[in-house]
Image: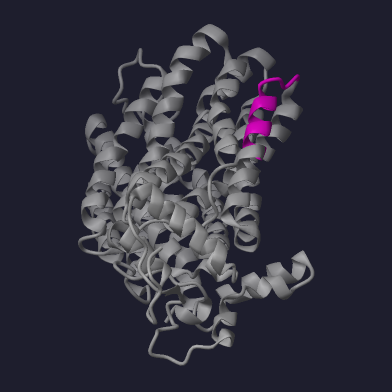
Amino acid sequence: MGDVSHDGYTIDEALSSIGFGTFQGFALAFAGIGWFSDAMEVSLLSFIGPALKSEWSISPTQESLLSTTVFAGMLIGAYFWGFMSDAHGRRMGNRGVGIIMYGAGILSAFSPEYISLVVLRFLLGFGAAGGHIFSSWFLEFIPKSNRGSWMLVLSAFWIIGELLEASIAWIIMPRLGWRWLLAFSSIPSLIVTLLSIIAPESPRYLFMKGRTNEAIEVLEKIALINRKQLPTGTLISDHQRPDEENSPSQETPLLSTFENETTIARKWFKSLCQLFSSDLWGTTLLVWILSFVYTFSYYGIQLMISTLSSRQSDCPSLRIFPKNNSLHVNVFITSLAEIPGLILAMVLVDRVGRKLCMEILTTLSVITILPLLFHQMGTVTITLLVSSRMFLAAASYTFNIYVKEVYPTSVRASSFGLANAVGRIGGMICPLVAVGLVRGCHQTPAVIVFGTIILISGISVVLFPFETKGRGLKDIVSETN
């Protein structure tokens, strides 16, 4: 590691010296597979419903319940996985998520009847709720100089998952049926489970837990793989600089208070209290508002697109796709539409910062949806909705980066998990607005609702306490100021 001097280096300084190299490429692949396996399992709900309706003669309510149970599982599991990851490590969280998703996914393919399938899809949703742990794990290996861009590259794996699911559904469903689709869709989760055996623990998490030697070992292995050198000196905390009085007691704040607790209930309560400490309560409320708003708006606009592109509305059909297009093709096309917005976010996020990037994308989303206050031609309507969804998705991806950066390591995964849970509530409510209003030929009120909600998100972004661009990640709550 080089000669040790009286100077010290932080985790961020170590990662900056190591750079983004071969190891981070492997880390991106691992986290990306976990991310797009999540997207595949959620996306396939669009394809198996009609097949089950035909084979098992289920009612429309039962068909909808399949999706609802998955989101209910995600609602319950979102904070659970974040808390477990903060308490017991990112590596264990990744492995647990992979095992449950693969187990529930592959068993779903052998479901003998409707009830067992609903239960298994609920368990899968519970596992899929932990998909955010992969991004938290990846975040803690990236140098701060280009952290935003690489996190958006990881977000692209979600789109890849949607495109891949639509493609294999297009190929498999007509030939082999829905059971084979479920089986094939579970393969990425199996790969994640196997790779998690060799994936290292986050050095930032290890150091925050007081396991300094283990953190250094991981950093040394990364430096070796990247053919770089770590800085000389000892590994120190961000708030422990060489010119300060150093003593062993100064490192003890980095030891998680979770280790001193004896019950899961007390650990959970302690984690929740940190999110509402004097340093974080304002940020937490704003994060919850934005998570709800972005999820509500994104899925609401997506449902409007689906409704207006079909014969489900009482209004004349505004179909943009040819009548002979399959559902698989339509999903593929609308998923592709998110790519330009993601590229725009990648260009902006490390140049103008997270907050301004979100503001620009949110403004573009509002601008593209406002013309729908007045009647437009069918193709224009769908194009504007798809564009608004594209910018909103890119803003949401940027928001996910900010949330992981603004919270310290001690509560990073649990805070994002809880925000995800709040967002799922928005996802469960939005169909009542989007589908209900559009099917009733009330497009203008629907646009007013979504336009207002998106504007609220823009105001919330302005109120965030600080910009995280170029800032090192913090480890404990007292370091967030």
Identified at 46% across, 76% down, the residue is: 236
Q: Quadrant of the C terminus?
A: bottom left
Q: Is residue 52 left or right of residue 353?
A: right
Q: Is residue 90 left or right of residue 69?
A: left
Identified at 29% across, 45% down, the residue is: 342
Where 143 falls versus 248 (above or below)?
A: above
Percent from the top left, x then y, of residue 160?
39, 33
Identified at 75% across, 73% down, the residue is: 261
Q: 470 and 161: which one is in front?
A: 470
The residue positioned farthest toward the top in the image shown: 175
In reply to whether residue 103 is colored magenta, the answer given is yes
Identified at 53% across, 60% down, the residue is: 419
Q: Is residue 233 left or right of residue 92?
A: left
Percent from the top left, x then y, of residue 431?
51, 43
Q: Is residue 407 left or right of residue 263?
A: left
**Which stretch did the figure color magenta?**
100-112
- Quick check: can you spot residue 278? yes
Q: How many marks?
A: 0
